[in-house]
Image (cartoon, rainbow, N blue to C red):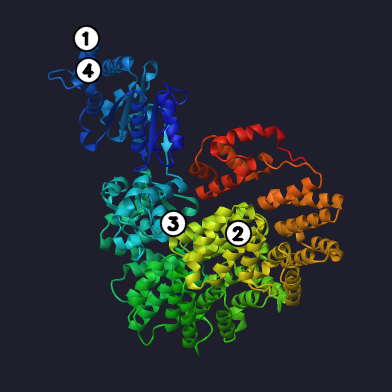
Amino acid sequence: MTLPAEQGELRGRAPELRTIDAVLAGADPPGPSLLLRGDPGTGKTALLDAAAARAGAAGMRVLRAAGAPFESGIRFSTLHQLLYATRDFAGQLPDDQRDALAHVLGRAGAREAEPLVLSTAVLALVAEVAAGRPLLLVVDDVQWIDAASATVLGFLARRVAGTHARFLAAVRSGAGGVFDETRLPERTVGPLSARAAAALLDAHHPGLPGVVRRRLLDDAAGNPLALLELPAVLTPRERSGQAALPAFLPLGDRLEAAFAAGLAELPEPTRAVLLLAALDPDADVAMVRAAARPHADLRDLSPAKRAGLIRVVEGGRLEFRHPLIRAAVAQLATADERRHAHLAVARTLGPAVAATPAGCRGTAPERRARHLADAATGPDEVVARALDEVAQAAWTGGRGGRPRGGAAGAVSALVRASELSDRPGQRSRRLVEAAFLANVTGQLDRVPQLLNDAGQTPHTATGLVFAATAHLLTNGSGDVDAAHRLLARALDDLDGTPGDGWDAYGVLYALLFVCVYSGRPGPWELLRAALTRFDPRAVTALQLCYDAYADPVGTAGPLRHRLSTAFEDLSSDPAPWQFIPLTYAAVELDALAAYRHLCHRVIDRERDGGIVTVVIAGLLMLSVDSIAHGQWDEAERLAEEALEIARADGYHLLEGQLRCRLALIGAYRGDATRTRMLTDEVTRWAAPRGVGLTQALAWQARAVAALGRRDYEDAYVQAARIDGPGHPSLGVPGRWMVLDTVDAAVHIGHLDEARAHVDAARQAGLADVSSRTALLTAGAAAIAAPDDDAERLYAAALALPCADQWPFEQARIRLAYGEWLRRTRDTTSARLQLRDALESLDRLGAQPWADRARNELRAAGVATVGSGPAALTPQERQIATLAATGLTNKQIGERLFLSHRTVGAHLHRAFPKLGITSRAALAGALDSRAGTSAPAL
């Protein structure tokens, strides 16, 4: 039997659908019968629906039945539901089989047949129905079918191999019954993959704020029903991110039926012990045992363990089968039961608890504070101060480790602390601190309301109010000028205060972002003056970042040593105001490669409920470093990942930075269309807001793109927007553009301007910033040099230490050297340089420069292969091969863990290399060139 092409494939269920297709096609394995087994809400019914639709489209007859609790006591009720439509076929059976079926089909006065006789009659009926037209039997919710029907259907499922019938059934995991003894082939229907779960949520509930979306994905844990139902039970303010999500997401009727099933029937002591475990995500056996006394014992947990609701995992921790079972346990308890349970847990986590069990993400003091807060019914300043410490640990790292839920959870802790405050000033301060943390944890929409609720009291942390507002202006709307003015006022408010605490570091951290992204000297001057007011040891990271941006040459030698020392001195759990400035400084000194491992560690720490801006900025810096080192696929992946987070959480300023990096990668690869599209988007947003760095990065990408297409006039214009001819700066990105500016100037005949630019760069000490800027400066000097000096300068540039760390810059200089050698008739030497340049440029995927090298080699008398699979990068070849099989960009992205946009960009670059213009020609291009793919060099 030929099955029709699949339409509207279930998200993330391709393997299960392939197994179902095999059943329908009669393939062995799995054979003609299959049992789907999975937790509630995993989509078993959707898979059965898909199977029925596919069977119907293939011309099969489909008979369906589903178990139901209220019919489970009626003998043969499911069998009647399944076979009633075939009653006319029963008349064609022998009398004894027809009589055996009469009772099942509801004929009045008919007697129940012996089990074997009835089962044989059902098999004969199914064979008769399937003889004229293939038949699919579908039985859902097997756990609720009556025992008599289950026995007959089990008999049938084991014997349909001799008929034209197929049998599919679905049962809930953990449910016992007859079907457990049939030993049918089974397919477990597990949770969706992270990618498929996100796609399902986005398709049905698009536009959710990042913090809400992440929480829903975490709590749903890949369960399709939860992904569809949970957002619907949130309030509009919760869905929009303007209000905090509750500790336990509310369950609607369908989710409660799925995840609370059986809880009410458990013994009362079992439910009490389950509640203790549910209220503490880090609950372990010892804690629950102590908290349960004297009313219950750990042995009371046995019924829940037998039901598969909870299990003991490594380290003695208790783990629910699904997060929503925890929510169901809490939701079914009364408020008074929850309060007493919180107090019982808090008592076990008192001062006598010296250590946190292995595997716990929260510390004992933090957990105790949260339980006491949840149990409190009125103001309690002692508990509020304990919650203050939880929030402080999320921002600074704390001596006891970071709290569960990270900085995002600390916002909720501070809000709860404000509710427990016994004085207005304390309440106001805590809400301001919550607003500040909300700015950096993906909760921008909550900031205005938190600041409004904080109000104004004599004890309000005015400086932090300004810092929180400045963060909101910078991150959200990108108004760096207004943020600068607010932070100047904030620093005035800090006069006379000690150089530590939320206010000081909060203001300085916000000011650093304004400095970096404004691209103007005013904010840097404000930061320089502010840093002098604090103990240098307390602001080491901020001072290093200032020096790396504003004075990289004056302190270049010792600066790199100071940076190395600062990274070595970092704790294993650095605070963001320490880590991010050091990372930025390392990137500006082209030195991040030595610290990438630390960067990855901090990013991973902050991914789950932590400081989102650290994740985005960290990925951005890693991407910038990967671009510089010629790892463009890796750079693109990192930037795309960061862009997805920034877009979801509303960090528009960081979005612009990431788009600029993607535009630069596109420019290097010769994707002029993508570069233009991205830079147009960015400049439309950045120009009216005065975000100078973003504008400059867009001009840089345009200049590189123009160089690639040999439009040297435009390249010169774009580069001059950043640094005028003869006036190279040590700023960003100017310190990396001396070669671009000089290359463009030389090609349009502005030799005097090019040489003046090189002289000025030397005088400014640009070569002292890093080995990369030294290579760029030396290469620019060679390009602009008179012929008498050029060969010496080219050789000196390429001989610089660490030149091979910067493969694109090195290859460009080799290319220019080879062009100069060919022009001066030293063809043999030219070929050597051009071959090396072409090899590097092809490996990088720098298509415009590779084509230029290839043309130069041809002019030097060397035959080359200009297109075909050999010209593809490994990832381009992999994507092109998958696309040639008919996969869509989205399907390829799911296989390779790339976004569909990245896949499209790779194909866009691959087409011209293969000499084609459409996907339809991919297979032929790859096959026809397979035998001639080696470079003819």
Which residue is the site of mark 3? Answer: 284
Spot the residue most to the left: 109
Residue 215 or residue 283, whichever sits in front: 215
Figure check: 137 above or below 437: above
- Three-letter residue code for mark 3: Asp
Q: Position of residue 388 (x, y in %)?
A: 42, 75
Mark 4 and mark 1 lie on one chain; the one further toward the N terminus is: 1
Mark 1 and mark 3 lie on one chain; the one further toward the N terminus is: 1
Q: Secondary structure at mark 1?
A: helix
Which residue is located at x 34 percent, y 48 percent? 228
- Three-letter residue code for mark 2: Leu
Which residue is the site of mark 4? Answer: 101
Which residue is the site of mark 1? Answer: 95
Which residue is located at x 51 percent, y 63 percent? 682
Which residue is the site of mark 2? Answer: 664
Task: Residue 589: tell me if it is visible.
Answer: no
How far apart marks 1 and 2 lie (CA) works out to 82 Å
In screen coordinates, is 922 left or right of 158? right
Spot the residue most to the top: 94
